[in-house]
Amino acid sequence: MSEPVPAAASLAPTARRWTLGHTPQERLAYKLLLPVLGIVFVIVLLPFLVALISSLREGGDGAFVGGQNYARALRNPLLYDALKATGLYALIVLPTEILLGTGLALLVNRVVRSPNLRALIFVFAIIPIVIPPVGVGVIARLIYAPDYGALNYLLQLGGLIQQEIPWLSRPMTAMLAVASVDIWQWTPFVYLVMFAGLQTVPRESLEAAQVDGATWWQQFVQIELFYLRPLLLLVLFLRLADVLRAFDAIFVLTGGGPGTATQLLSLYLYRVGFKFFNSGEAAALAIMVLVGMSLLYSGVARLLPVERD
Amino acid sequence: MGRSHRVLKVVGWLALVVFALIYLFPLYWLLNTSVKGRAELFASTPTLVAQHPTLEPYVTVLFDRGYVRLLRNSLVVCSLTVLLTLVIGMAITYPLTRLPVSRRLRVGVLNWALSLRFLPPIAVVVPYFLIVRTIGLYNNPLALVFVYTLFNLPFGIWMLKGFMTEIPQEVEEAAYVDGATRAAAFRRVLLPLMAPGLLASAVIIFAFCWSEFLFALILTSTRDAQTFPVGVQGLVTQFEIIWNEMAAAGVIAIAVPLVLMLAARRHVLAGLTFGVIREK
């Protein structure tokens, strides 16, 4: 799989030393691991099997229908609306969060020198990340709602608009509202990861570049970006996984509406399964999502800068 | 350097302040709305500062609406989840870091746990619903405990692995030299040394669990089993939203994980990035 790393090399001799009798420790290891892993594996596998079986059956009477559920799922135009909405959401959210988060990290790294202030910013940046998405949905509702929304009120107060804007009842503004929630909540995460990454840039190389008269931009592109690249990949992938599971905040804020404007894939699946009670079609969709995600994951997994030892 | 440098600095500071304001305003607004009385809610324009702050909305939500019950459910579900996740997590992590298992197995388990992080819950919601209904655990908090344990396990394994590898094996080896059994070394040497790590993991898992919504929405149907986030959502989708009560419920929903995560803030990032980012 991945290349052997020094950590593994140093671990091996220790392990060897412990295997004196060879069997007892190894036996203990498997005695601990196998039952637990077995149970967990079954619990993970079970829903997959159940989904597979129900995707091949009729929702009502359970008759075997082969690939019909898949065909029906793929024929449903709402699926393509959902895919489009998910794509649009990802296209708005991912670049904004990554650019903004990285930009903020660079800014704070250059401008803020005091360790106390840096610690304070760290705490502030943690806050949105740990708020339950349902809570974020509630907050967003208070901001964007008609009649009582704070945004309209503030805009009117500032004289920027004369009439209330119905943010949540127009497709485009509703999508922006939903995206803004994601951006509000997750830009700080990108910031924190990138800021931590910037702390690993050796000061000497930056100082050398400064002596050579490199501008901020040159320092960023030629030195800092090199250290941030693996982290950018990690963040992009984690955020992508989260976009595909985005549900709670959108469910609370728009419920997928108006129409299907903010009905992302996860909300669509929920609707098929629990509003239309079409378990066959929902299971077929679930299987397709699982296969898609597995393919995506296996394609990118080895690029993740994660220490697997 | 000179003047342009200073100008850039000022602009940078301004940008940071503006950002901070944009970030904090929504939180302020939530808090502000949650302490408004009924009369103030129906004022023609929203008031920027609550005129007569009151805790009445909180009392209404918790007692008149009976949401204390949901708080209790959340507490029970999350505590059990933390316990189960840590026990299973330790049973997996200990052999992986302390016993001579093959490298392939170790890397395989860690990779598998990592891949679960990328499993969209929505894809297994339908099958879980069917399974839970079949085995008679629908609307039972235990169903949530099992599902939450499963979904927190990848995170738990990676976090515990991080904490366990930080403790040098020599400490336990010294105990073996003194004649301690493996079980004794685990209990009296490793566990106490890992206590801070276990506590941090517990706190973060509890907070994740507290925030979960999708499974709670689908696997429960009545107050007997619903968790607090489901109750919050129930206030939002009503025909007429009572803003102060919704905000008060939001504050309660937010407060618990916020306090916990801030307490464990030094480990949150390591957890979220599978140990890639470590705060000193």
Image (spheres, rainbow, N blue to C red):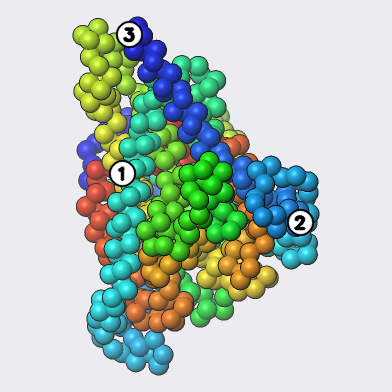
For the residue pair A164 and A216, the one nearer the viewer reads as A164
Q: Quadrant of residue A18?
A: top left
Residue A178's image quarter?
Answer: bottom left
Q: Residues within 10 Å of mark 3 (few under 14, many from 20)?
A: few
Q: Give the labeled residue for mark 2.
A: B39
Are callouts 2 and 1 both on one chain?
Answer: no
Residue A59 position in % (x across, y down): 39, 86
- Look at mark 1 in the image and give the residue it sits on: A95
Q: Residue at x 51, y 75 (%)?
A: B132
User: Image point 40% across, 76% down: which residue?
Assistant: A272
Q: Nearer the viewer, mark 3 or mark 1?
A: 3
For the residue marked with disc 1, what is the amino acid? Pro
Q: Is residue A75 left or right of residue B263?
A: left
Using the rendered image of the protein, determine whether residue B179 is visible from the camera's viewpoint. no
Amino acid type assigned to the residue bearing label 2 in the image: Ala
Residue A202's place in the image compared with A152, above or below, is: above
* Residue B130 placement, left or right of B70: left
Residue picked out by circle 3? B1
Residue at x 25%, y 16% (from the top left corner): A215
Amino acid bearing label 3? Met
